Image (cartoon, grey):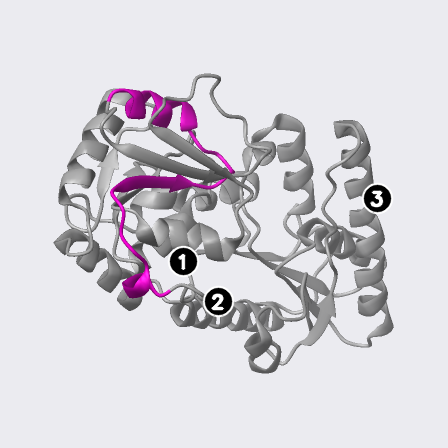
């Protein structure tokens, strides 16, 4: 079986190429910031169709079955798989970094994804609720859960970063800055620093003790985080994978982390031991959690040290890739043992 590893950057996952014995296919995604929502949606849709034709041409040119392993261009691969079945080609699809987001919750998108998943598909997911989502669309697909992990944050040495008495929060997707700002307004003696995108929709009223930094480069984002006394990850809803990279970076830096009690974050922490949870969208709960974190935070925090140890022992990038490789190989063996797929499979 010929394997193709689809990446959005040739520098991503270099070791997977050799370990998985796969041919690398680089399909770059171009960010669209201009034009109407309809225009951007149509451009993305056309790009996915174009990419799917490119992937199908690879499959069609081979004489044996194909396994398309995707870090990017997931919809293009699924469409290529569907086209392949029309031409009686033996195609299987394996997806990772295929995150659930607010758009995938919409009825029309769910219908489209459900249809595309009616073929031989394996998915590597990073939050418990993503398992529920994908299995609700197709109970027979192979879904494997393992928490998202983060490699060592480069460019920042936490021990050399001057510490300041601020509470840091950052990120763009699925953030509840409304509750955070309300909580900050109740604690005027504590300084807050929020690093987010200029496109982030922020509350109209920003308390005087909250400073904003927009479109911060990654190294500066992490430097600001490393200098803070505590870190807050305020999520707005339980949509799947979001807030994880910020939480894991804060753990690496030995910070006391206040986290919304959603599965995508709570999977990393033991409340009161390695982090402090709060009830999502509850300003009273968030205020209390921040107050506790601020009091126990700082460079000598025992909770922060335990969080750093957990990040190093349980959530390393090596562990994440090892689990990914094991499941890809398991999925591939299962596909080979079951033989050629048929047009009616999983329908």
Viewer-nearest of labels 2 and 3?
3
User: Does the CB distance between marks 1 and 2 fall below 8 Å?
Assistant: yes
Secondary structure of the residue carrying numbered label 1: loop
Disc 2 packing (10 Å; few <14; some 14–19; many ≥20): many
178 in relation to 338, above or below: above
In this rendering, the answer to whether 176 lies above or below 333 is above
Q: Alpha carbon of mark 3 to alpha carbon of mark 1: how far? A: 32 Å
Residue that numbered label 1 is attached to: 146
Q: Nearer the viewer, residue 10 or 223?
A: 223
The residue wearing badge 2 is 324
Q: Which residues are magenta?
A: 157-186
Answer with mark 2 or mark 3, whichever residue precedes in sequence.
Answer: 3
Q: Where, by quadrant of the figure, is residue 336 drawn?
A: bottom right
Q: Look at 55% across and 54% down and name the residue there.
A: 97
Viewer-side residue, 266 vs 65: 266
Q: Secondary structure at mark 2?
A: helix
| Left or right of residue 85: residue 263 | left
* Mark number, residue 24: none
Q: In the shown orientation, is residue 271 left or right of residue 268?
A: left
The residue under the point 73% across, 66% down is 26
What residue is disc 3 on?
46
Dot 3 or dot 1, earlier in sequence: 3
Q: Where in the figure is residue 77, as x and y percent of width and height? A: 72, 56
Label 3 secondary element: helix
């Amino acid at each position: 079986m010929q394997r193709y590893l689809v990446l959005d950057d040739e520098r991503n996952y270099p070791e997977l190429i050799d370990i998985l014995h796969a041919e690398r296919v680089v399909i770059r995604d171009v960010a669209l910031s201009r034009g109407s929502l309809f225009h951007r949606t149509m451009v993305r849709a056309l790009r996915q169709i174009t990419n799917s034709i490119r992937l199908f041409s690879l499959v069609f040119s081979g004489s044996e079955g194909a396994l398309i392993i995707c870090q990017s261009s997931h919809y293009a691969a699924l469409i290529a798989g569907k086209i392949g079945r029309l031409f009686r080609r033996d195609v299987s699809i394996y997806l990772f970094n295929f995150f659930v987001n607010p758009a995938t919750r919409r009825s029309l998108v769910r219908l489209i994804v459900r249809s595309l998943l009616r073929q031989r598909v394996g998915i590597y997911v990073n939050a418990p609720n993503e398992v529920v989502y994908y299995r609700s669309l197709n109970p027979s697909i192979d879904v494997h859960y393992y928490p998202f992990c983060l490699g060592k944050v480069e460019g920042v040495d936490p021990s050399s970063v001057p510490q300041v008495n601020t509470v840091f929060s950052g990120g763009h997707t699925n953030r509840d800055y409304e509750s955070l700002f309300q909580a900050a307004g109740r604690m005027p003696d504590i300084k807050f620093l929020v690093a987010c995108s200029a496109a982030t929709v922020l509350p109209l009223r920003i308390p005087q003790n909250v400073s904003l930094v927009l479109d911060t480069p990654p190294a500066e984002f992490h430097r600001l985080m490393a200098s803070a006394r505590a870190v807050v990850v305020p999520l707005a809803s339980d949509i799947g994978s979001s807030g994880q990279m910020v939480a894991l970076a804060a753990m690496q830096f030995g910070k006391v982390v206040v986290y919304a009690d959603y599965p995508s974050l709570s999977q990393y922490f033991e409340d009161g031991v390695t982090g402090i949870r709060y009830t999502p969208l509850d300003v009273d709960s968030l205020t209390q959690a921040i107050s506790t974190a601020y009091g126990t935070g700082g460079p000598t925090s025992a909770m922060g040290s335990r969080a750093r140890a957990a990040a190093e022992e349980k959530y390393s990038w090596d562990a994440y890739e090892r689990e990914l490789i094991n499941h890809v190989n398991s999925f591939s063996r299962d596909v080979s043992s079951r033989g050629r797929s048929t047009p009616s499979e999983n329908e």
